[in-house]
Amino acid sequence: MWCPQTGNRRQECRPGEVMLEVNENLRIPDSEIEYTFSPSSKPGGQKVNKASTRVTLVFDVGGSASLSADQRRRIEKHLHARLSKDGLLRVVSQKHRSQHANREAVRERFGELLREALKQRRRRKKTTVPREAREQRLRAKKRRALLKQDRSGVSDIDE
């Protein structure tokens, strides 16, 4: 099915569904993201034990219909330390005093993590050390050895 919002053929799209745009190639529908709310450990004044302002975002990397196989592999490779055994990615925010602000902060952080994981990285081009630099290093070593030999007061018998 073709989705006019995502421009993606693989996933079904409900009209008016909220999407998290990670980059130009990936949009994740809110239906694939689970939010849980709990009391924050930060100070909150009189409402400290009443308001659940801490937000935990849970995303199932393995079960997501929005991700291609390549995207899934990259995310699992770069975020392996943050993934649970079940392949769930958890992001927590309790920076702000309001649930709404923490929800926006956790969505932004989640987007940053995915953007960083999906970023194309250049392969390192192997180079060799130039001959002149190698010879210069050896000359410097020889100079240093001679200096230390002169300091020791022991002279070579071969002279």
Image (cartoon, rainbow, N blue to C red):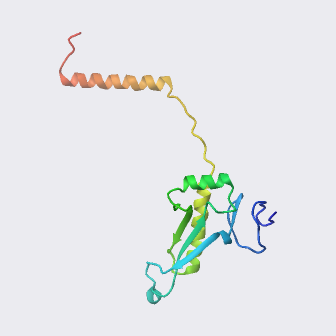
**Residue drawn at 64 percent across, 62 percent down:** 63
Q: Is residue 149 above or below residue 94?
A: above
Q: Is residue 48 above or below residue 158?
A: below
The quarter of the displayed image where residue 142 is located: top left
> What percent of the width, then of the height, locates residue 12?
76, 66
Residue 144 visible in the picture: yes
Horizontally, is 115 left or right of 93 in the view?
Answer: right
Q: Say which of 133 and 10 sits in front.
A: 10
Horizontally, is 61 left or right of 8 in the view?
Answer: left
> What percent of the width, then of the height, locates residue 13?
76, 68
Q: Quadrant of the C terminus?
A: top left
Q: Say which of 141 and 102 sits in front.
A: 102
Q: Residue furthest front?
A: 86
**Residue drawn at 60 percent across, 69 percent down:** 107
Q: Residue furthest bottom?
A: 46
Horizontally, is 107 left or right of 38 in the view?
Answer: right
Q: Is residue 138 above or below residue 82?
A: above
The quarter of the displayed image where residue 86 is located: bottom right
Q: Residue furthest top?
A: 159
The quarter of the displayed image where residue 124 is located: top right
Q: Is residue 118 above or below residue 99?
A: above
**Residue drawn at 51 percent across, 85 percent down:** 51
Residue 159 visible in the picture: no
> What percent of the width, then of the height, locates residue 151?
21, 25
Q: Quadrant of the N terminus?
A: bottom right
> What percent of the width, then of the height, locates residue 41?
43, 78
Q: How many marks?
A: 0
